[in-house]
Amino acid sequence: MLVEGETEEAAMPIFYRKKYNKTLTQDGIKLINLAGCDSWQSIIKTLLNSRSEHIHFLLDKDCQTNKSLSIKESTLKNLGFGDCNIESQITFVGKEKEFEDEFENAFLLKAIRRKFPSIASQKWQQINFEELRQNKKFSDAFVKKVSHITYNNLKDGFSKPKLGELLADYCTVKQIPDSIITAFEALRNKIGLNR
């Protein structure tokens, strides 16, 4: 499973374990971080030495709309995917732009309060989620804001991997976004785990 970034890389193993009571590794699934939507083609060229039918992308929705980064069936075919159906190879996540958009403001606030119970509630009330969501990358703005609030409580700061862990740890199985379950199911079908 190819994911776009650090948040997804940290969250997917936790979501998977919650949903299937197994680790990705136990089910023979390798998670690969593309480190951004713009690097997917070079990684695919390398992976095609393996089996393209067992590759599934989990990408932010902005990869679908950004013309310079977008993944199209014709591009996949040119890279060696043959007669692929793009819907079976890719799941786009995020309500608007990115994976982190899947989570409502109230959910984020509850998760962050649970993670940092010693920080006064009033500091968390200062987070204007709608303002943060107006940034080009909500996740970057959110991580920066949480880092600022928690700077005395974390030795190594707050990061996107920590955000991924926070989101996944706080989610119940029923709260895992549908797009994530769709991606897991598509991949499990491809490798014969749902038979």
Image (spheres, rainbow, N blue to C red):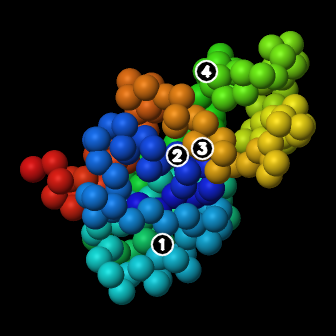
Badge 4 vs badge 1, beta-carbon distance below 8 Å: no
Cα separation, mark 4 vs mark 2, equals 15 Å
Q: Position of residue 23 (x, y in %)?
A: 34, 52
Q: Position of residue 42 (x, y in %)?
A: 55, 80
Q: Is the residue marked by circle 1 packed among few (<14), some (14-19), or many (20+) residues within 10 Å?
A: few
- Whichever of labels 4 and 2 marks the residue nearer the N terminus, that label is 2
- Tell me the quarter of the image containing the N terminus: bottom left
- Whichever of labels 3 and 4 marks the residue nearer the N terminus, that label is 4
The residue wearing badge 3 is 164
Q: Is the residue marked by circle 3 packed among few (<14), some (14-19), or many (20+) residues within 10 Å?
A: many
Cα separation, mark 4 vs mark 1, equals 37 Å
Task: Determine the residue positioned at 57% across, 66% down.
Answer: 34
Cα separation, mark 3 vs mark 4, equals 13 Å
Task: Determine the residue positioned at 52% across, 77% down.
Answer: 43
Q: Secondary structure at mark 2?
A: helix
Query: Which numbered disc covers residue 11?
Result: 2
Q: Secondary structure at mark 3?
A: helix
Q: Position of residue 48 (x, y in %)?
A: 38, 81
The amino acid beneath tag 1 is Thr
The residue wearing badge 1 is 75
Image-quadrant location for residue 69: bottom right
Q: Using residue 90 as the reference point, say whether residue 192 is left or right of it.
A: left
Q: Using residue 73 as the reference point, say whether residue 130 is left or right of it.
A: right
The amino acid beneath tag 3 is Gly
Q: Nearer the viewer, residue 123 or 127?
A: 123
Cα separation, mark 1 vs mark 2, equals 28 Å
Discs 1/2, front: 2
Task: Determine the residue positioned at 88% across, 39% down.
Answer: 151
Task: Determine the residue positioned at 44% across, 62% down.
Answer: 31
The amino acid beneath tag 2 is Ala
The residue wearing badge 4 is 107
